[in-house]
């Protein structure tokens, strides 16, 4: 039994949270590792590579045009990833370590769709520059799931209104969402890092008490 996704596993220090890393378009399983270590030094990391290729660029699901997603493919890829994530704690011997999704752009959209579909395997999720991927699955309940969303005020790829709307959708599913608008475009900034660090420290601190 193993993952069908190309992946990179870094165990990290015992007892630390484990980041599930979901890259943006054109990234790979190692793309967000430096960021994850800056957010929470010593954390475990499981980086996955999306299986869709768009002109040679790795993605998590197909799109029909910029900002227009192939909903059928999105649903299928979300279901596939969800099935494999349910194996992760056992495969990597995580015990009671927290699993926190860390997704950027296309990877943040995939993580968001997992949440909207009612996936409850994360202790928290950091969604950087997300859009609304699709509709929430009826009956989903995120019961206090901690989520951080950061959107760039000048982001022309993922307009900030998308992050705000996603935040509202997740709150409607009873998630505990912190939405932050940063003075930036699509690229990440030091402010994104600081927000993620303080949010992550709170999450880790809360769970250890």
Image: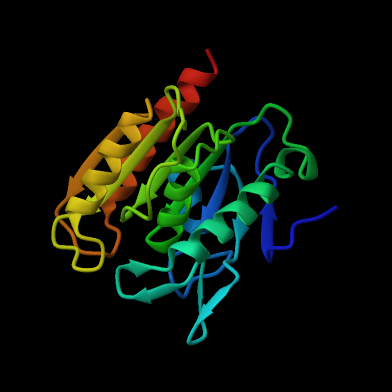
Q: Position of residue 48 (x, y in %)?
A: 61, 60
Q: Is residue 140 rendered to the left or right of residue 11?
A: left
Rendered residue at 85%/52% (across/down): 1
Tell me which colouring the rendered structure shows.
rainbow
Left or right of 105 in this view: 179: left
For this view, does 139 lie left or right of residue 48? left
Would you say 131 lies left or right of 206 here?
A: left
- Res. 6 image quadrant: bottom right
Residue 80 seen in the figure: yes
From this view, report whether residue 140 is shown above or below residue 207: below
**Residue sitting at x 47%, y 72%:** 62
Q: Is there any visible trace of residue 46 in the rendered image?
A: no
- Residue 193 location in percent, x, y? 33, 48
Identify which residue is drawn at 25% across, 49% down.
163
- Front residue of 148/76: it is 76
Q: Residue at x 33, y 54 (%)?
A: 130
Between 120 and 137, the one nearer to me in the picture:
137
Q: Is residue 202 above or below residue 130?
A: above
Place of residue 164 in the rendered image (x, y in percent of width and height, measured from the top left): 21, 44
Image position of 27 with respect to 46: above or below:
below
């Amino acid at each position: 039994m193993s993952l069908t996704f190309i992946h990179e596993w870094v165990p990290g220090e015992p007892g630390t949270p484990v980041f599930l890393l979901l890259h943006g378009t054109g990234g790979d399983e190692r793309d967000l590792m430096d960021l994850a270590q800056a957010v929470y030094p010593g954390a475990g990391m499981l980086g996955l590579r999306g299986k869709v290729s768009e002109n040679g660029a790795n993605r998590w699901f197909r799109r029909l045009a910029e900002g227009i997603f192939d909903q059928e493919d999105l649903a299928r890829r979300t279901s596939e990833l969800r099935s494999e994530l349910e194996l992760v704690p056992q495969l990597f011997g995580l015990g009671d370590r927290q699993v926190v999704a860390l997704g950027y752009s296309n990877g943040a959209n995939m993580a968001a769709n997992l949440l909207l579909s009612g996936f409850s395997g994360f202790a928290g999720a950091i969604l950087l520059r997300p859009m609304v991927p699709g509709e929430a699955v009826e009956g989903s309940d995120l019961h206090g799931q901690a989520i951080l969303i950061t959107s760039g005020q000048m982001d022309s790829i993922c307009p900030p209104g998308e992050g705000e709307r996603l935040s509202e959708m997740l709150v409607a599913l009873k998630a505990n969402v912190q939405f932050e608008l940063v003075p930036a475009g699509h690229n990440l900034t030091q402010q994104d890092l600081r927000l993620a660090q303080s949010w992550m420290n709170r999450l880790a601190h809360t769970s250890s008490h």
